[in-house]
Amino acid sequence: GGAGLLVPALSPTATAAATDLDPTTIPQFQQKMPVPPVLKPTSVSGTTSYYDVTMKEANAQILPGKLTRVRAYNGVFPGPVIKAESGQRVVVRQTNALGVPVSVHLHGAHVPESSDGSPMDVLAPGGGTKTYTYPNDQPHANLWFHDHAHHEESENVFRGLTGFYLLTDSVEKNLNLPSGSYDVPIAIRDARFHDAGQFAYTMGDIAGRTVILANGKPWPYFEVAARKYRFRLYNTANVRFFTLKLSDGSPFTQIGTDGGLLEKPYTTTSLALSPGERADIVIDFSKYPVGTTLVVENTEPGPPGTPMDLVGKVMQFRVTRTATDTSTVPATLRTLPALPAATVQRNIELLMDETGGEHAQAYINGKIYEMDRIDTEIQYGATEIWTVHNANARAPHNFHMHLVQFRVLERNGQPVVSGNDSGLKDTVSVKAGETVKIQATFTGYRGTYVYHCHMFDHAAMGMMANFRVV
Ligand code: C2O
Ligand code: CU
């Protein structure tokens, strides 16, 4: 928890290394990737669905033959799926049966401050409860919920407090995209274990987390039919960036980003996801004979010393059968709202101590996060352009805003025309030295929300700030 806050930023500790589970002893492509379970509402009244969720410790079978103690929503690792529909309310009563404070943030959602799950709005350990009301007054999007208690979120998320929240609407449902068992959410992250199979967590431990998990299993396989699949990819890692490709170099189709579908499908052979980002993709396995195996590879090297033979693989697809396929990916997926003219420009600078060391700190515009300080005041209804610069020479960052879905106008001075930056976004990568220009309109709710680097360890080190819509 909080006691482990300011420990080495860039390297694991020697003591942790001594009891490490050797990741090369974990067999790859031996465990089946599970599909996370969909939560059932405890009741439905009119257009409102009510859920009861308890955050608790549980034993999860992650490693073969070992149990790992996790912190998880209803004890499900990684978290369950909540399915929601635009215009229909979801009310979640959360109970904290853990020994640490928690706050449940619905990432990417347009919600009132009282249900945002902000870092300062925590549920007390040992039974604290809170009822979150999600109006779902936004278009379809692949959202997720995760812990956000300040100074606790990094460890809580690492130990399992994440879940999927799939919001749909008539625009999305009227398309004939792959659905049912051909529509699979996948949370990708890294982890580190002690040799007894327990999680080994240290703040800022970037190089030591070399076990890659897909839906909670290390380097799993997933059996597919020779047809199109939709995969909703989530990067739920604390700090690791992924750049994904198929081992045969085949193109696939990106159909959506954080905030829902792109205007038109985008064909690519590689996809970069920083922590917190999502991508909606379609892979067509119909060209592969039954018996084919394909590996999802990660070409993102990570910090020096990261063994590429481990982190360079994510999971395996096995084409095990044929199947009919009447789904389609149309040339036009949706229309994005027109960009209104911006009236306010701001500059945001992300910077952290790059030496690592015992007390790494991280800043936005030179300041460490303080709960009670309002860093940016925004007029209700304003459209603003924020120029976000990563002032570090080596450390990557990204940038996430609560309340809004934004658009990325430019990356490093170049206009964004297609691909992962071109849709509705709530999280955008900003690697060392990079600058992105983003535009957002602040409507719907007044109140205080945060923006931060979504590398949870960096946010916990201070790279977070408050904005208030007035
Ligand atoms: Cu996904 Cu403020 O976070
Ligand atoms: Cu960062």
Image (tube, rainbow, N blue to C red):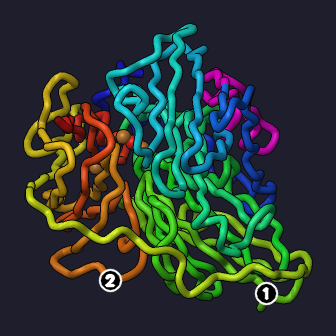
Q: Residues within 10 Å of mark 1 (few under 14, many from 20)?
A: some
Does residue 197 show up? no
Q: Residues within 10 Å of mark 2 (few under 14, many from 20)?
A: few
SS class, disc 1 = loop
The picture places residue 53, in percent across and down from the top left corner, at 65, 25
- Residue nearest the viewer, comparing 306 with 287: 287
The picture places residue 287, in percent across and down from the top left corner, at 77, 91
78 shown above or below 221: above
Q: Which of the 4 image quadrants contains residue 98?
A: top right
For this orientation, the residue located farthest to the bottom is 287
Query: At label 2, which amino acid type do we have?
Result: Val
Residue at the image position 19 percent from the left and 35 percent from the top: 468
Residue at the image position 33 percent from the left and 60 percent from the top: 428
**Bounds of the magenta segment:** 52-78
- Residue nearest the viewer, comparing 427 with 220: 427
What residue is pinned by disc 1? 286
What residue is pinned by disc 2? 417
For this orientation, the residue located farthest to the front is 46
Q: Earlier in the sequence, mark 2 or mark 1?
A: 1
Does residue 428 show up? yes
Q: Which of the 4 image quadrants contains residue 435?
A: bottom left
Residue at the image position 14 percent from the left and 61 percent from the top: 387
The span from disc 2 to disc 1 (Cα, nearest Å) is 29 Å
* Drawn side of residue 133 relative to residue 121, left or right: right
Residue at the image position 57 percent from the left and 37 percent from the top: 89
Q: Quadrant of ligand 1?
A: top left
- Residue nearest the viewer, comparing 444 with 351: 444
295 shown above or below 310: below
